[in-house]
Image (cartoon, helix red, strand yellow):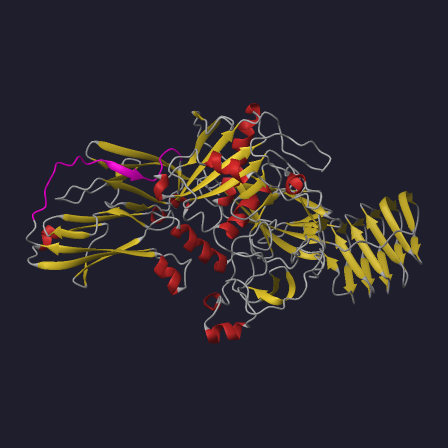
Amino acid sequence: MWRRAVVAAVVAVVPFVTPVVASAQLEAANVVPVRITGDPAKRFNIVIVGDGYTAAELPKFREHVDKHMNVLLSLEPFKTYRSYLNIYAVEVASPVSGVSCDPDLGSPRRATPLKMGFWGGCNASSVQRLLTVDNTALTQYANLVPGTNSGNRQLLAIANSNTYGGAGGTYATASGGNALSALITPHELGHSLGGLDDEYDYYARGVKGDPYTGGEPSSIHHTLLTPQQMTAQQKKWWRWLGEQSLSGGPIGRYEGGLYSGSGVWRPSKHSMMKTLGYYFDQIARERMTQRISGKTNILQDGIPAGTIGADRVVWVGTLHPTSHALTVTWQLDGNPLPGSRSVDLAALHLTGRHTLTATVIDPTDFVRDPAVRQSLTKTRTWAVDASITTPRPPTTVTFTESTPADHPVGGKDVVYAETTHPVDRIVPIIWKLDGTMLAETGTDLDLKPLQLTGTHTLTASVPGQTLTWQVDASVPVPAFQLSQPVSTVVKPGQPTEYIFNAPFTMKLTATDDTPGYNITEFQTDGDGWFNYFGWPTDANSPYRFTADGTVIDNLVYGKLGEPRLSPWDTPPSGYGRHTISYRAADPSGNISPAGKFAVTLLKPAPACTTTVTGTHLGPLVVSNGVTCLDNAEVTGPVTVLPGASLVATNATIDGPVSSVLASTVELLNTTVRGPAAIVGTSDTLTIAGGRINGPKVFYGTPKESFVSQ
C-alpha cells in the first residue's frame, strides 16, 4: 500500500552534462553526481530520477533534489554515514510538464518518460496521494549510473508536482515541490532499506484501525510484551527502555501500530515511522545503521588475506563515518599489537611462522545489540612466514581516496585521506589547519576537539601532493516570525513570551554562508525536534498553531502542546503557556544553538452580547450577559456584577475596575487608570498587556486564569 514518510547536510547539485542514451525508447538523460564519496561499486548509491520536468524546468529538479537530500542527510544515521553514500540524479527532459492525474482524475494524462501519475496511475479505485512510476523505465534510467546495480542502490523517482504524494516499497516515489515531499524519502527508506513497518494506528486515513488480534509481531519495533516482560525475556527494545527518545519522550510502550488502533505497542510516541517530521527513534536508528553498513563493506581495502612475509608493512583500508573513526585493532598470535591502519612487521624482527589478524569495528553508540555490533565487525587474517622475502617495487606516494573536497566539511566532521602503501614504510600524512601543523599524522582527523568557529583551510600533504578542504565551522542563524500577538511579555532571565487570544502562525528561516538548502526545526515543551516544512498545503505559508490542531486530509497538524496525528487522538488542548525552541542545520552539517521563546494561547472569550466602541461617558455597570469594549474608552469606573462578563480589548478605562463573582473578566491590551479588584470569577480571569495604574487585588480566580500583571 501507499506509505507516508517523515524527517542536513548535503552539497548543492554538481552539474554533469554529458548526455547518455539508454535505448531508442528512452529520452536522453544526464547523470548528475550530487554527492560522491567513492567508487560506486564500494558504496551505497541513491539514484534519483526526475519525471515531468521539461528541459527548461531541470534547474527546478535540481532544487528539489537538493532539498530532499539535505533533509535526508540531516537525519541520523544518514548524517553520520553520509560518507558511505553516493548520490546521483538522473536528469530526463520530459516533452511535457507535470505528471498524470495531478491533482484530479479529470486532470490530463501526460506522456512523461517515467509515466508517473497520482491516483495510483489514474485509477479511480485508488487514492489521490498514491504516486506510481513505471518501474521498468525507472530501472533503465538508473542503469545509466555506472557501477550501480540492484544490490547496492536505492531508487527514488521525483515528480514535477506540488501535490502531496508518494509511494514506498522496492522503489520510492515522491512529489518534488510539496511542503512535505522531502520528508517522504527517509520514511520510505525506512521501509525499503530498513525493513521497518508503519506505526500508524489506521489503514485508511480517518478510520481508526481495528484492534490487533495476531501473535507477537515479527517487526522489531512492535510488540505485545510489557516493558517488564521485554526486560525479563531480553526481547525487542529492552536495551533502550527509559532512554529519552530522539523523537520525543522516553522509549517505552505506546499503543497502536501495524495499522491497528489498539492491542499492539511501539517504542516511542511519534517517530518518523508514525509521524512526518520527527527523527528515527533509537530502535529504528539501530536497524538503519546496520542496513546502511550492510550495503557496503567497512573493511574496504588492504593486503589480501593469505601468506605474507615478516619484512613488510601490512595495512587495511576502511570506510570513514563523518562523526567518528572506525577502530582497527591488531593481534599477533592472539596477543595485542600496536597499530592503527598499518603495522610494520619488519620492526618486530620476527622469525618462524605467525598469525596476524586485523579487526575493524564500528564503535558507534547507535548500536547496543551484540548481534548488530557483530555485523559491524570485519576481520582479516594473514599467515606470516619469516622465510618469505617480500618484493619491493617502487611505489609513488600519492593520495588514493579522501573526504570529498568539492564542498565544505563541517566543523565537527572527521576528515580522512588514504594513500598508497609502500611495502617498506608507513606513510605519515601532514595535516595543517590554516597553515599550522597538527599533531595527527594518521588517516583520520577529528575536527571536534579543535572547537573551531568560522571558516578555515585544512590541508593534508604527502611528498608531492596536497589536498585542500574548506572547513565551514560557522553555524547557521535561525530566526522566527510570529503573527501579531495580543501582548508581549519581557522579563529578565526568561524567554520572551508572546500572548495570543486566537490561533497564531510561526515562520522559521535560516541564513548561512554555505550554498544549499538549510534545515529548520522546532521543539515544543521539550518534545522531539520537528522538521519545519511550512504548512502542509503550502511550503511558503507559516506553520499554524491551534489548541487542537487543523485537520488536513484526515491528519492533524499544528496542535499546540502535546501533539496529535489522528482526529481521534485526545491529548489535552493546547491552551496555556508553552515553550518553543528552534534551531537550524546547514548543508555542511553544522547545527546552531537552540533559540527559545514562550507562547501563551488564551481560551476563546465568550461571545459578546453587547459591544461598546468609541467613547462611553461616565460609569459602566455590566449587570448581565457579555459586554465587550472594543477599542473603546470609558470615562468612569467599570463594575461587573455576579454572573456577568467583561471582555475589554485595546480599551481605556478612566477609573477603577471592580468585579465580584463575575463569570469572565478579560483585559487585553487595556489601560486601567485606577485600581482593579476582581474577586471570585467563576470561569476565567485574563489580563494580558496594557497597564493597571492603581493597586491590584485578584482573589479566588479559577486555576486556568492568566494574569501577566
Residue 271 colored in magenta in the image: no
Indicate left or right for 610 with 569 as reference: right
Task: Decide if residue 600 is in sight here.
Answer: yes
Q: From the viewer's side, name the closer residue of 170 and 89.
A: 170
Q: Position of residue 692 (x, y in %)?
A: 77, 53
In the figure, residue 100 lies in which quadrant?
top right
In percent of width and height, residue 269 lies at: 59, 60
Q: Foreground residue, 505 or 600?
A: 505
> Across the whole image, how many numbered discs are drawn on residues?
0
Q: Residue furthest top?
A: 56
What range is drawn magenta here? 389-407
For the question of whether residue 594 can be seen, the reply is no
Residue at the spot x=93%, y=46% of the render?
A: 617
Magenta stretch secondary structure, dominant: loop
Q: Is residue 683 above or below residue 637?
A: below
471 sits left or right of 350 in the view? right
